[in-house]
Image (cartoon, rainbow, N blue to C red):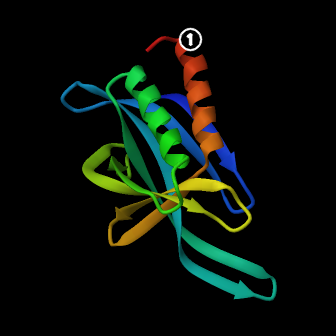
Amino acid sequence: MRAEIASVNQEDNVDSRTYTIFKYQEEDGTVNYYMSLGRSFNIISIVSDIGTSTLDHVDETCIYMGQSVDDVFEALDKLLEVSGEDVGTVVTYPCRLVDGIGRITGESTATCTVVKRFLQNKRLNFQFQSGRNTASVDMTPATIKSLRWTLNVSNKINPQ
């Protein structure tokens, strides 16, 4: 069972992505909290006179955030700390992929690197394996702060 408790949309001139904090009841009955990083990667890109068309494959990976809302706040604070580190700083996080019917499956790791994109501020770039492909997604510090604020409001309205 998956219950969303906070969600933030990050839009920039490159991408639009929704990040979600949710709690998930595992098959053994325990409840864990995750942050969803939806990810699409380009399979085919066709450039023609009328524009660029792509055929994308969409995967979802979920970063483990802890067993309580307090753990989630702590994990978000740590992400903010990492985003303030020097470009090139690398941290790994436990993650799990979501299968085609919405179940969270096997354990893996996501590599998080502090990057600075051309004409943009620093951000966190998460990379993870999806089948034989490596997927990648960027997250800004502003998104992390928005998730924290949204989670705080949600927790005050409906304590977890």
Residue 77, percent across and down?
A: 49, 33
- From the viewer's perspective, is 121 left or right of 138? right
Q: Given the current orientation, which residue lies at the most extreme left position? A: 28
Residue 123, percent across and down?
A: 59, 54
Q: Is residue 141 above or below residue 138?
A: above
Per the image, label 1 sits on a secondary structure element best described as helix
Where does label 1 land, which residue?
156
Residue 121, percent across and down?
A: 68, 55
- From the viewer's perspective, is 7 left or right of 4? right
Q: Is residue 31 above or below residue 82?
A: above
Q: Is residue 55 above or below residue 50?
A: above
Quadrant that contains the N terminus: top left
Task: Say which amino acid is labelled 1.
Answer: Lys
Q: Given the current orientation, which residue lies at the most extreme bottom position? A: 49
- From the viewer's perspective, is 64 left or right of 16? left
Residue at (48%, 35%) from the top-left corner? 76
Q: Nearer the viewer, residue 88 or 34?
A: 88
The answer to whether residue 152 is seen in the rendering is: yes
Q: Nearer the viewer, residue 35 or 48?
A: 35
Q: Nearer the viewer, residue 47 or 119?
A: 119
The answer to whether residue 3 is seen in the rendering is: no
Residue at (36%, 63%) from the top-left corner? 130
